[in-house]
Amino acid sequence: MILLDSVTKKYPGDSEPALDNISLHIEPNEFVFLVGKSGAGKSTLMKMITKEESPDSGKIIIGGIDLDYVKKRHIPGYRRRLGVVFQDFKLLPRRTVYENVAFALEIAGMSNKDIRRTVPKVLELVDLANQAKKFPHQLSGGQQQRVSIARSVARQPKILIADEPTANLDKLTTKEIIDLLKKINDFGTTILVTTHNEGIVNNLQKRVVTLKHGKIVDDQKTGGVYKLDEAPVPKRPARMVQTPGHALRPKRRVI
Ligand code: ADP
């Protein structure tokens, strides 16, 4: 579903690569948190997926599409197949909630009839059916983010990526947004989220991938917790020895 194979990216003028030989495979329907300190390479990895940036070397295949073969003029069409959620919502300020979602469908080529059928359902999903006529500035931060999520899932993307979707939200609203992403994941969408929020990562216990200096230093496939460093090298367990007449016992004392 999301496949990065030996991806390296160095921005012009930087001495170190932002991504250093990254390989990552995300299966359909996974929910993955991408964590790491500021500058670790999280946004660059997201930009590889949206094709805002291209790798210097390595292969990227998203939903079966080899990004090497997506020509410049096809990038907008490719991006519309992904759901992308931003920390600053990026809503159209002069359009209502309904129109923000409808507009995304319109540019994706959906007929007016289908738009009229789809928008109310999506607003229902994000619990904003009763705010359809409001403008973004009349909504709370959490509500604006829900419009933004509605807009990105309206086209039923197989993959949703969200770069710090809760960075500008308070604790309670953050939980609402993460619950919503979980619901969307339960409906079958693969989700990749970057975050600095230790609480939500530890709460959800999903897969957690840690980036550090452009490298994947930890990948907890299930029950993941927030970690900014590599997993500690496990202490070598004591070697068991069998002596005649004695049960198996450790060779040396383990403290
Ligand atoms: P994160 O999202 O984890 O904070 P980034 O992907 O934004 O990390 O950055 C990774 C590294 O790449 C950093 O050293 C950063 O300074 C550098 N970088 C990011 N974007 C650019 C850019 N447009 N030009 C030059 N260097 C960049």
Image (spheres, grey):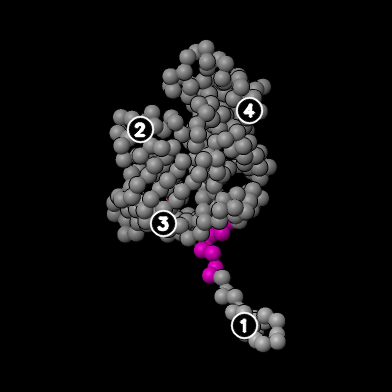
* Residue under label 3: 214
Q: In this picture, which residue range is highlighted in magenta?
A: 226-233
Residue 175 is situated, as x and y percent measured from the top left of the image, at 66, 42
Measure the alpha-carbon separation of dots 3 and 1.
43 Å
Q: Earlier in the sequence, mark 3 or mark 1?
A: 3
* Residue under label 2: 75
* Residue appearing at x 43%, y 19% in the figure: 109
* Residue farthest toward the front in the current orientation of the protein: 244
Q: Are marks 4 and 1 in contact (CB under 8 Å)?
A: no
Q: Earlier in the sequence, mark 4 or mark 1?
A: 4
* Residue under label 1: 241
* Residue farthest toward the bottom in the current orientation of the protein: 244
Q: Main secondary structure of the magenta part?
A: loop
Mark 2, secondary structure of its residue? helix
Residue 161 is situated, as x and y percent measured from the top left of the image, at 50, 40
* Residue appearing at x 66%, y 50% in the figure: 203
Q: Earlier in the sequence, mark 2 or mark 4?
A: 2
